[in-house]
Each structure stands twice: as C-alpha cells, then as structure tokens.
Image (cartoon, rainbow, N blue to C red):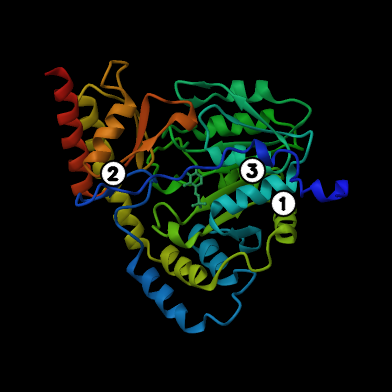
C-alpha cells in the first residue's frame, strides 16, 4: 500500500476543537403533555399573516428565491427607518454570526466574548481557525472593563449579546458606547440583539444608532424569537457599507429561501402580533420570576423572554435534580453546564398553562425535599 492510501482529508485547524452545539431537548415521557421551555421560542407562534404567506409560497417552489432578499430588507428598513442597502439577511442570525467570523477571523486572530455569552460565538471563532478569548463577568453581566482588558493586538472581533442569553441581563446603552469608544477602530464590535424587542428599559438600545455612526459596529437581529419563525431560519444584520459589502461577497448567493422571505415580510409588518407577544411577556416575566423566588429559588433579573434560575447547593435540590423531575412531568428546561452554570436552569416564558405547570411542579419538587 502506498502511504497516500492511509491519508485522509484533514479539516482546517480549529474544527475539531468545537464542541457541537446541543439544542434544547424536546421529548416528554409517553402520555405526558410536553411543555418545551428550553429554546426561548414564543408561546404565541408566528403571525397568522406569516403562516398564510408561507403557505402561498408553496406554489412556486421550483423557482430560485430573490438572492438579495430585497422585499424583506425593504420591509425591515421600513419598520425601523433604516437604509435597506445596509441590511444583510441570513438563515438565522447564526448564519450571519458565522459569516462574520469567516470574514474577519483566521488563524492567529482572537475573537472575544463574555464568560456566559452565547455559545454560537465560540463555535464560529473556532470554525474560522481563530482563538476564543473569554472576559470575566460581574454579577452575570457583561463587564465592559473586563472586555477592554482582554483585548490584545490580535483581537479582531468582539461579540456582545445584549440582552445576553442565557443570563437575561443587559448592558445599558451608555456602557455599550463606552465599550465601543475603548476599542481600536480595526476591531469589529458585534451587537447581538436577538431579544431586543422584549426589552422595556429606558437605558437600553439595540445599537442601530451606533451602527449608523461608526465603521466598526454591526447589530444582528432574528425572527426566531418574538416573531416566532425559528423553524424558517431568518436573521438580519445592520452594518456599515464596508462590512455589508464583504458579507454579500462571501455569503451563499441564495442563502435565504422564498418561503422564509415571504413569511418574514408578513411577520415584520404585523405590528399587532408583535405587540401581543410583548404584552404576554410583560405579564408573565414578573409573575414567573416572583413565583420562582417565592419557592426559595434565585432568579437573575431578566429583560428577555426567559429567566436563569439558580438552585440551592443541597442534595436532591440541585439543578440536575429539578431538571430530571420536571422532565418526568413533561416540562423541558435548558441545562446550563455548557455555559459554566451547572446549578442553574434556563426557563423560557411559555403559555399561561405552561408557566402554571412549571411553577406547580417546582413547588412539589421543592416541598418534596423539605418533607
Ligand atoms: C436565539 C438567539 C439567536 C438567534 O439565532 P437564530 O439563528 O436567528 O435562530 C442569536 N443570538 C442569541 C443570543 C440567541 O439567543
């Protein structure tokens, strides 16, 4: 045998360092009603108009979609008063985050994110062959000083989820501006605003204003959360012309499919449905937070559509025990080991029925232990 026959394809450096992303579970035991509260999906589902647009698009599946997503970019631009030329759409914001990594990072470069930041950043950085660097957090929130202190001459991209998943905490806009002011102009600041629509704080801004006034900031958004279209994979990004040009060169020419484009236009135009989803969250986020606190659990104050719940360090009462108990009752939460929070679970605000169910089961779980 020639030595060549023992050879096999070798991936680029970094690929094998990636721990594959583990999505939220979605299985209940047989015969038990499932409440999936593990992936921050909306209990209201998408706008009925988005569903109708999706169905109508089934009549033209043989045609290639509009590769430049013109109608969707224009609908988004109209909704937020933006320049459509500076919007890029992607198959979920995950695709855009990954494209940013491939465009701006390579071997020897560093991508920076915070301690309990969204795991997709690390995957993208490693996939690009670059080195992930992690900045410590304070009280489960991004610490601007720690991020700035972690910058080196190799830093090329800084990722901030604002609000952050899985902690639910946020950086006030003044802090985002302070972070931006402390970065070299050749470092790209990525503001991932997947939950922006849910935030009700006067000192919060998603970052559109900063994107408009600088050359090194992009903001990503998604249709997966408040718009309820996670299954169709729709994300968008607002950025400076230079970054938009690069992404339009490296992305797949037809990275968005027609049914997603059609449903996306309908969803972003249906303000009433978005308001309804927001009101549901405004009602239940405080109720669920209080319900959990009343059970002696610690909840990180959240501005998103989910809460991070911390369990006591007591035999039988830790997060994995609660997770096993809830799973047996058909209530699925998200385990947090991968985020370095082994004694916490992340709970998505669900329907009234699901929220009551999780609070009821946790009450039984907590009192069972005390008995
Ligand atoms: C859910 C989420 C996204 C959205 O991902 P999509 O690929 O658009 O579904 C992005 N960032 C964060 C922090 C998220 O939690």
Give the number of the mark in front: 2 or 3.
Answer: 3
Question: Are discs 2 and 3 less than 8 Å apart at CB?
Answer: no
Quarter of image, res 236 = bottom right
Q: Residues within 10 Å of mark 1 (few under 14, many from 20)?
A: many
Dot 1 or dot 3, earlier in sequence: 3
Q: Which residue is mark 2?
A: 282
Q: Secondary structure at mark 2?
A: helix
Q: Residues within 10 Å of mark 2 (few under 14, many from 20)?
A: some
Question: Is ligand 1 less than 8 Å from the beta carbon at label 2?
Answer: no
224, 217: nearer the viewer: 224
Counting from the top left corner in percent of width and height, residue 111 is at 68, 34
Residue furthest out toward the left: 371
State whether residue 60 is above or below residue 330: below
Q: Which residue is mark 3?
A: 124
Counting from the top left corner in percent of width and height, residue 114 is at 56, 29
Residue 299 seen in render: no
Q: Which mark is residue 243?
A: 1
Residue at horizontal 50 percent and vertical 29 percent from the top: 116
Q: CA distance from mark 2 to mark 3?
A: 33 Å
Question: Are discs 1 and 2 less than 8 Å apart at CB?
Answer: no
Q: CA distance from mark 1 to mark 3?
A: 17 Å
Q: Secondary structure at mark 3?
A: helix
Quarter of image, res 24 = top left
Please state if 213 lies on the left or on the right of 233 as rendered.
right
Dot 2 or dot 3, earlier in sequence: 3
Counting from the top left corner in percent of width and height, residue 256 is at 58, 66
Residue furthest out toward the right: 2
Dot 1 or dot 2, earlier in sequence: 1
């Amino acid at each position: 045998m020639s030595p060549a026959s023992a050879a096999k394809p070798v991936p680029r450096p970094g690929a094998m360092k990636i721990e594959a992303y583990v999505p939220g579970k979605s299985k209940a035991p047989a015969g038990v009603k499932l409440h999936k509260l593990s992936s921050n999906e909306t209990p209201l589902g998408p706008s009925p108009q988005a569903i109708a647009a999706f169905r109508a698009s089934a009549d033209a599946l043989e045609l290639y979609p509009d590769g430049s997503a013109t109608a969707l970019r224009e609908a988004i631009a109209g909704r937020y008063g933006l320049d459509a030329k500076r919007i890029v759409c992607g198959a979920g914001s995950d695709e855009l985050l990954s494209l940013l990594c491939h465009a701006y990072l390579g071997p020897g470069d560093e991508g920076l994110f915070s301690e309990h930041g969204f795991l997709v950043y690390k995957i993208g950085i490693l996939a690009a062959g670059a080195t992930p660097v992690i900045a410590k957090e304070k009280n489960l929130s991004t610490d601007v000083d720690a991020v700035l202190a972690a910058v080196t001459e190799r830093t090329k991209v800084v990722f901030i989820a604002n609000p952050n998943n899985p902690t639910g905490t946020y950086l006030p806009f003044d802090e985002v501006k302070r972070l931006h002011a402390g970065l070299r102009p050749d470092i790209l600041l990525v503001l991932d605003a997947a939950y922006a629509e849910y935030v009700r704080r006067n000192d919060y801004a998603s970052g559109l204003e900063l994107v408009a006034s600088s050359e090194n900031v992009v903001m990503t958004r998604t249709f997966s959360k408040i718009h309820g279209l996670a299954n169709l994979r729709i994300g968008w990004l607002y950025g400076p012309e230079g970054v938009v040009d690069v992404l339009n060169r490296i992305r797949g020419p037809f990275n968005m499919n027609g049914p997603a484009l059609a449903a996306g236009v309908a969803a972003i135009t249906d303000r009433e449905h978005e308001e309804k989803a927001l009101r549901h969250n405004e009602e239940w986020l405080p109720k669920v937070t209080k319900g959990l606190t009343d059970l002696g659990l610690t909840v990180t104050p959240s501005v998103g559509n989910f809460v991070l719940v911390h369990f006591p360090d007591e035999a039988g009462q830790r997060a994995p025990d609660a997770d096993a108990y809830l799973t047996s009752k058909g209530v699925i939460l998200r385990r947090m080991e991968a985020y370095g929070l082994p004694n916490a679970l992340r709970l998505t605000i669900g329907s009234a029925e699901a929220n009551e169910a999780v609070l009821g089961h946790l009450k039984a779980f907590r009192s069972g232990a005390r008995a």
